[in-house]
Amino acid sequence: MNIAVLGLGFMGSTHLKAIRNVSSAHLGAVVSSDRKKLEGDLSGIQGNLGGPGEKLDFGAAARYTTIEEALADPAIEAVDICLPTNLHAPVTLAALRAGKHVLVEKPMALTVAEAEAMLAEAEKQKRVLMVAQVLRFFPDYVAAGHAAPALGTPRSALFRRRCAAPFWSDWLSDRSRSGGGVFDLLIHDVDFCLYLFGAPKAVRATGYENLAAGVDVIHAEFEYEGFSAIVSGGWHHPKAYPFSMEFTLVYDGGALEYGSEGRPLALYDAKGESRHLELPIRDGFEAEIEYFLDCARAGRQPEICPPAGSAAAMRAALAMVESRAKNGERVSCSR
């Protein structure tokens, strides 16, 4: 399937490196206003995952300086939107109306109204829309999701993600474009929390935001029937602070724990025994793109990563940030 990558920043580069290992993907076009990047020189790109930028061979791919050119190209069947978050909704709507299937980077949008418009347009145009909530395809998270149902009733959950404030993309520190650091970063963990437990009733959160100083932190408690889930982390000053992600899930039948800093996924069962779980071997970004293209080719809506679920995660993340702004006031996630 011919796919166009819109945006050649950190995530665009990450997706391009994955696409070259997906046999069902054919890179039909790339879009950037930067002529150097259009020539395949992404060596200056940096991020918190996926290694340094590279020089890529775009081969016979069309190279466009505007999104409109790519959407007007009849050879393009699907688009992969790797643009700042404030552009997700308008570009997704334009792509769907142009008859393209859409994979759009997380967060889905900046507002609930935008997300709802995206869902409605995908249904109207009968096209596949999927949000790139890549944790649903990361091996440790996939294995935890498969193991969790057999462990019985959940009793506690902790999700944590921390990193330095990004210095490679100015737009991330602009709330009007990114929604803020905590929203952009922890949407991963909010989405995985909802994948496991569904939407919470409400959230309470405290923390601190100073985007100009590179500090944006939160400690949020999601309210469920009989237990709570903690989502914690954020930006811890610029440049030096190391990236990490982790979770601890406690059920009646045992606990699942993973940490990116040297703690592979393990199950600690109720009998006092422990073992590491077998993981899928596929790279998460490759698996995500392959799954999206399989859905698009079949005209089948995504079940592993449904866009309505991504919209629900966005609603919960916005409620989390709202509660922090209100000094921990309880905010409903059902509005």
Image (spheres, rainbow, N blue to C red):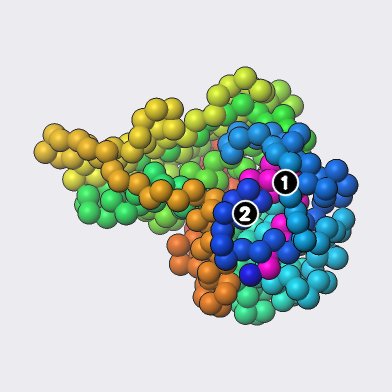
Q: Amino acid at mark 2?
A: Arg
State the SS at label 2: loop
Looking at the rendering, which quadrant does residue 276 occupy?
top left
Image quadrant where one finds the C terminus:
bottom right
Residue 20, labelled with which disc? 2
- Residue 113: percent from the left, percent from the top? 66, 62
Left or right, residue 46 beside residue 48: right
Q: Measure how far apart labels 1 and 2 are at the Cα level.
A: 10 Å
Q: Who's the residue at 85% across and 43% down the image?
A: 36
For mark 1, what is the residue? Answer: 56
Q: Is residue 117 above or below residue 137?
A: below
Magenta stretch bounds: 2-15
Is residue 114 visible in the rendered structure shown here? no
Q: Who's the residue at 88% across and 47% down the image?
A: 35
Q: Who's the residue at 63% across and 70% down the image?
A: 1
Q: Residue furthest left?
A: 271
Badge 1: few (under 14), some or many (20 or more) residues near its Cα, within 10 Å? some
Q: Who's the residue at 44% across and 32% down the image?
A: 260
Pointers 1 and 2 in contact (C-beta within 8 Å): yes
Q: Nearer the viewer, residue 311 or 67?
A: 67
Q: Amino acid at mark 1?
A: Leu
Left or right, residue 181 beside residue 206: right
- Residue 139: percent from the left, percent from the top? 41, 47
Is 242 inside the magenta-drawn segment?
A: no
Q: Earlier in the sequence, mark 1 or mark 2?
A: 2
